[in-house]
Amino acid sequence: MKFNNLLIAEKTQWAIITINRPNKLNALNRETIQELHDGLKMLDEDKKVKAIIVTGSGEKAFVAGADIAEFADFSVKEGGKLAKKGQELLFDFVENLSTPVIAAVNGFALGGGLELAMACHFRLASDTARMGLPEVSLGVIPGYGGTQRLPQLIGKGRAMELIMTAGMIDSEKAKEYGLVNHVVSQEELLPLCEKIAMRIANNSPVAISNAIKAVNAGFKHSNDGFASEIEAFGACFGTADFKEGTTAFLEKRKAVFPGK
Ligand code: COA
């Protein structure tokens, strides 16, 4: 399989997927989302692969979000479709994959980037990483499961504050919040992920895939939340705030929101 935006390294018992659009800080455009789906599916079907590590190329970013340039002129309908399709193709898909997926957060994980990391089964971060859901600064909301998975992982109050302020937290804070399990230097990040992958590889893949199913089943009651997120995300695309927020980002200026 040939990928334009991913690098895939297959080791003896695990694989590393590197999202490779460094000049766009690995932002998730449509093609990258499709390739991640295809790449994960391919590795999941490979019996030798007992764990998958997902990381970003370069030293700066894991993934700096969904590709803003791609959706800035979308309608309400297109916005809703974007969220729904993305959730089905990638974010729900990762969460429910039977092979363990570890996010190696090597830099900025913002918006769709943090949402991807949160959809992975667990996360490690470098001490240089910064995480946040800045969507409301663009006049939109997280649409790839962020309004659901962030409160699941760090609690409602902390998630509300992070979403409302569009702020970023560093790795130490993310560890304190339980968003990431371990924080190490950038050089140590992949080796530690591989060490964990190696430990996972010693165990029963069938039992692990059942454990993933069972753990995820405990959170299934929030399915309505995901549907509400898609609807609310789409609705943002019909607002003047969204037009201003995305235009300001692309024009590299601060947004001035018309507001309520
Ligand atoms: N979508 C599209 N392009 C993006 C992007 C995104 N989410 N994030 C970064 N880029 C692009 C920039 O437009 C820039 O492209 P250019 O060189 O062609 O102009 C390039 O990546 C480098 O980013 P830049 O903003 O110049 O880097 P920086 O070091 O000044 O800032 C960030 C880094 C992460 C703080 C900043 O890029 C940012 O705020 N990104 C958007 C984050 C966001 O809101 N994500 C949620 C999307 S829903």
Image (cartoon, rainbow, N blue to C red):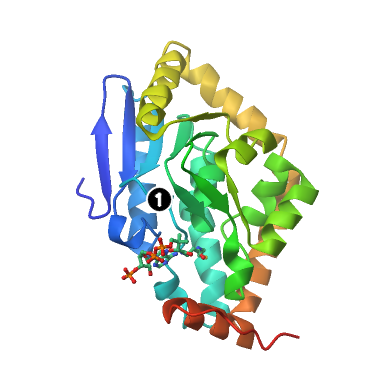
Q: In the image, residue 164 lies at what x, y percent?
A: 71, 63
Q: Nearer the viewer, residue 132 or 10?
A: 132
Q: In the image, residue 228 lies at what x, y percent?
A: 71, 63
Q: Nearer the viewer, residue 139 or 101?
A: 139
Q: Can residue 239 be seen here? A: no
Residue drawn at (38%, 41%) of the image: 55
Neighbor class of circle 1 (other Cα within 10 Å; few <14, some 14-19, many 20+) is many
Residue drawn at (41%, 30%) of the image: 189
Is 149 situated left or right of 72 in this image? right
Q: Which residue is mark 1?
A: 61
Q: In the image, residue 233 lies at what x, y percent?
A: 63, 70
Please, is residue 176 above or below residue 115 in the view? above
Residue drawn at (54%, 74%) of the image: 79
Q: In the image, residue 104 lies at what x, y percent?
A: 44, 36
Please, is residue 107 above or below residue 233 in the view? above
View extreme (right): residue: 157
